[in-house]
Amino acid sequence: MGTISSGVGLISGINTTDLIDQLMAIEARPRQLVEERVTQLQSQKAAFQTVNASLLSLELTGSSFLDDSVFGAMSATSSNTSVISATASTDASVGTYNFTVDRLVSSHQMISRGFADDDTNALGLDTTIRVEPAAGKLTRTVELAELNGHSGINRGEIRITDRAGETATIDLSRAITMDDVLDAINNETTIGVTATIDGDRLKITDTTGQTASNLIVADLGSTGTATSLGIAGNSGGTNEITGSNINYISVNTALSALNDGNGVRISNGANDLVITDHSNITVNVNLDGATTVGDVIDKINEAATAAGSNITASLDSDNLSLLIEDTDPFSGTQLSIAASDAKNDLGFFIEDNGNTGQLNGDRVIATMGSKLLQNLGGGTGYTTIADTGPGSVDITNRNGVTTQIDFSTARSVQDAIDLINNAGAGVTASLNNAGTGITITDTTGATTSNLIIEDVGAGDIADVLGIDTGAAGVAANSLDGGDRDVRYISTATRLEDTNAGQGVASGQFTITNSLGVSATVDLSQGNEVTLADVISEINSRGIDVTASINSAGDGLILTDTAGGALAMKVEEAGGTTAADLNILGEATGTGGDNYVDGTFERTVTIEADDTLQDVVDALNSADVGVSAAL
């Protein structure tokens, strides 16, 4: 028979399953309310955290308003960031500024005379061609920004009236260098004047031969250009206006601008100046971190105060040198500075032998457009500046007349040239064709005597200039002193300024000494700023290879002292760092000649049977920083 099933109780017929589920739901209700409350609280917590984060951000942003400089903040934007970028300091003037590209970097070109053919006839030269950067010349380009204590000049227009009464407006608004100023004035055909450099100033000379007007140089407009060039004025009936000094230093002058751009060698950690005052108090001066002349003065004065000394440092009255004074009563101890690189670079050659209480530094910048004599000979220059100066020179012209010239006031190459030319010695002095040395030319037209030039006494200026002939002289009308190896690289030289201004790439190179022991020098950290840093890195490798500045003052030199039989070599370890430092390659010899000289002066050998094409090929294959073409 069939069966009947149902979801009710076995006897009562009640639906127990639903009943149990409903009872369980009633019991779970408090738990569900708690879970809903937890969810609600978590949502509130997240909201409070968002508000808290926003308040913290507001607090951090608002705290910056405690600094007054925030209210003076300025910003600048460039309309073409690929050409020029701009930042604005708090004292920047509000406005829109337009910049015009005045000139682009271009290569320097030289052209020879013509030849009959390019690849048939030998030139018969049998010589060398020497190539080096323009920094090796005894002249330098004067940037207008360097003048007036590195505050520069005001660019604009000036008006010049010559003595014939003719007037011209000279636009100097786009002048960058002193050469630009000279060219703008001297190329103006409306007026008869010439502009020249006269030591630390400009000189305007009337060439008309007329007297209808005074020679007048005036500012035009409100820029004050002539005034800032030091030449605004009236000749008062003479044919010349000699300007005021515009080539000087100030507390804002960068140390890197001193000594023909060789800067001041700072020892990084040691005392750079050790000064003993009249009370025998020692003042130790550490110049770490100094970047300007003002920084040096401050550090000396701070060190003196800390040591209880009464010495003070300041700019000397000529604004070309530094002065250290001791106001203590003289007790017999000589005011002095111990020997150091920084002492020499700051011009303190002369001791206080007379117990005057003053150490007068020598000038630390050359006259405009020239180089300091002390940087000749790779920086050895003349070493007898103290008290006696560079001494005197006897010049005997070819007519047999001897003139003695006192060079005690000469500090720059141009000073020496001017002293010779103004001495009436029957000779003229000028830079040689390469601009790297001095040429002396006899103007007497006689042949009675040899041309004789000799230093007198302890002085050595003729030798430094390369024109000392000895007692016998030369049987010629002219004498070329040759390349004087002016120093343009020192341990203070910044890496960005080396390699003809192209800088040094970050990277590594490997040095293998004469025993075959190698070490890698790592300049990829970005901490190396000057050649002193590079030298320190190389010398720390402990493989008996010593780095220093070479004797010509134009590059690094690596010297092997390991005493092995192999030629030392320098190889790249990725990159071009060694090549940029010009030390890539092998030593040319072993033993005492086991060194790599990184001079940036290069030579190319030309054989007697070389044709013009051979010369071109030799220059291009030598990799000396020039290209040659027919």
Image: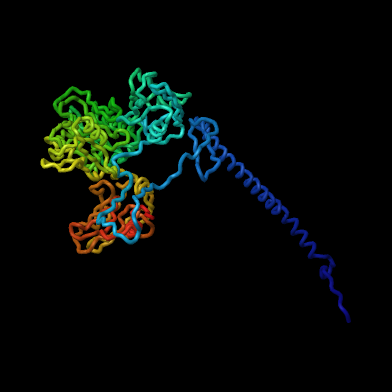
Q: Position of residue 99 (x, y in %)?
A: 51, 37
Q: Position of residue 187 (x, y in %)?
A: 41, 33
Q: Position of residue 252 (x, y in %)?
A: 36, 32
Residue at left offset 62%, top offset 47%:
46
- State how many labels appear: 0
Residue at left offset 46%, top offset 29%:
156
The correct choice, above or below, for 255 with respect to 215 in the image is below
The correct choice, above or below, for 569 with respect to 446 in the image is below
Residue 377 occupies quadrant: top left
Q: Is residue 572 left or right of residue 48?
A: left
Residue 622 in view, yes or no: no
Q: Is residue 391 left or right of residue 375?
A: left
Q: Position of residue 204 (x, y in %)?
A: 35, 27
The correct choice, above or below, for 515 with respect to 329 in the image is below
Along the viewing direction, whichever of 554 and 493 lies nearer the viewer? 554
Residue 333 occupies quadrant: top left
Residue 514 in view, yes or no: yes
Q: How is the image coloured?
A: rainbow
**Image quadrant occupied by the C terminus:** bottom left
Q: Residue furthest right?
A: 1
Q: Is residue 51 left or right of residue 29?
A: left
**Image quadrant occupied by the N terminus:** bottom right
Along the viewing direction, whichever of 181 and 477 lies nearer the viewer? 477
